[in-house]
Amino acid sequence: MREAHPILVGGAWIEDPHPTDTVKPINPSTGHEIGDEYPVSGSETLHRIAQHAAQVAEVLNATAPDRIALFLDTHAGFIDERRSDIASIAHTETGLPRSPRLVETEMNRTIDQLRQAAACVRSRDWMRPRVDTQNNLRSMFEPLGAGVLVIGPNNFPLAYNGAAGGDFAAAIAARNPVIAKSHPLHPGTSRMLAQCAHDAVVATDLPKGTVQFFYHCSPDDGLALIRNPNVSAVGFTGSRGAGLAMKKAADETGTPIYLELSSINPVFVLEHAVRDRGEAIADQIAESMLQASGQQCTSPGLIALRSSEYADQFIDQLSSRLKQASPQVMLSHDGRDGLDKAVQHNMNCGAECLIGGRKIDDDAARYEHTLLCTNASHFLEHHQELQEEMFGVAALIILCDDNDQFALIAEKINGNLTGTIHHSDCDAPVLKALTRPLRLRVGRLIHNAVPTGVHVSPATVHGGPFPATGHPGFTAVGLPTSIHRFCALRCYDRVSDDQLPPELRDRNPTDEMLRYIDGKWTRDDADE
């Protein structure tokens, strides 16, 4: 029996003293165990991790921002140096293409997120200091004061990883210690990223335990960790069922929890758009659906268009493109089975299968590319049942009898990360009527493009109304806004200048930074 890998607790890699089981990852391309074993941590170990995070938080709160920024840059550098090895194990554990997906695309995004977070820390703009000199009131965003638990998903093993992804970068930028949990489908990948983080902590002399890491735990032990008073916030990306159970646990103790759950990302192709450039749009949507075997949170899962000969041509083109592409390996056999369950559910609710709809009978976790279809009247009558997320290369087409049904469909759409409208100039009246209800139901509204491909930009919103996320006022991508999830907004009322944080003092001793003073955003220059 192979010895289980160590976990990172209090600044040291140790053998888990109280494991309850082990995790054995499976190669989704072969269906065979990879060979390594990873401990499932029990409540005693998790309590110890949380307790240490709270102790570290006080020290980290007093750490100079420039050293936090140096850590983030150093972590990014270590990942860059080891990108080939990290990508290789991620490919084995997830089946995602090594190149360009892992080695270049996702790796570069991961590194860029960390470096953007470092830039935000140096500028201190995320703190949003506000000063009212007349009333001697001051406020700013500050660290939470305990550990932030970050739980990454299976579909982005690098860019959303608990030890290196966007939630990790945001939590660390706010000077919170991070408790990183691996996803059980890619523990080896997470271990390598956690090692990069640990090496960066050592190299920059941050407090031991700034980053702690474990592989897995039972659902009950995980919920108990969320309730632990030494956990100040949780970032989670994953299934709706697991996320809602976590939210219930977090609500019991008032712990902020930021959830990214499920999204079908509706796409509306208006009448003149499908007539003028239907073939090109079908090609765009097919390419978007095929990315990462459809296992992206922004993958198009619902396509609405008006019934016509042009719509028929669009569907033929989309079907042809999907049938021509060979089904890729999915992240896991359980994921393939979950896709099949969702497809069968939608078919049982009256959707007609145009192509696909079946598992591929071999050892790899693969599924036929699938298109389902229904009419607008049926969808409107059964809209709740027909919004089951199909996490893979699968989409439901809705054929409308008239243009008025586009807005009616949008009114019945649940909260989503994205909503897309393909339109031409002649579609202006329909576009206006459709935009009103759709705008309220999506975090990111898109015109004449595809929802996949999320830019890490300060203007990006990767969030949306429930059930896409647990809170519509925040984003998981886009700095500095994403940092505010893991902050406390604190006010100082007539506090003496020497007792204020440096960023709020009358004479700001830090480098030039943006402050809101007496109704105006301004930058002080400490050298004047």
Image: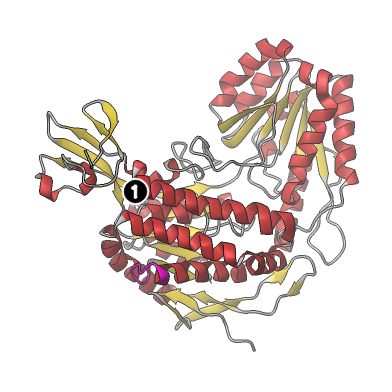
Q: Is residue 231 left or right of residue 186?
A: left
Q: Quadrant of residue 380?
A: top right
Question: At x 11% / y 49%, what residue is drawn?
Answer: 498
> Counting other residues with Cα less than 10 Å from the Cα at mark 1, is it few (<14), some (14-19), or many (20 or more)?
many
Q: Does 208 lie within the magenta span?
A: yes
First to last magenta residue range: 203-209
| Three-letter code, disc 1 | Cys
Can residue 162 be spotted in the picture? no
Above or below for 419 versus 292: above
The image quadrant where one finds the C terminus is: top left
Rendered view: 128 above or below 169: above
Q: Position of residue 110 (x, y in %)?
A: 56, 54
- Residue 12 visible? The answer is yes
User: Picture coordinates of residue 170 (x, y %)?
Assistant: 43, 51
Q: Position of residue 410 (x, y in %)?
A: 63, 25
**Image point (45%, 67%), residue name:** 200
Residue beneath the point at 71% across and 64% down: 91
User: Residue at the spot x=67%, y=44% of the render?
Assistant: 389
Picture quadrant of residue 5: bottom right
Residue 62 x, y percent position in the rendering: 25, 59
| Residue 232 magenta | no
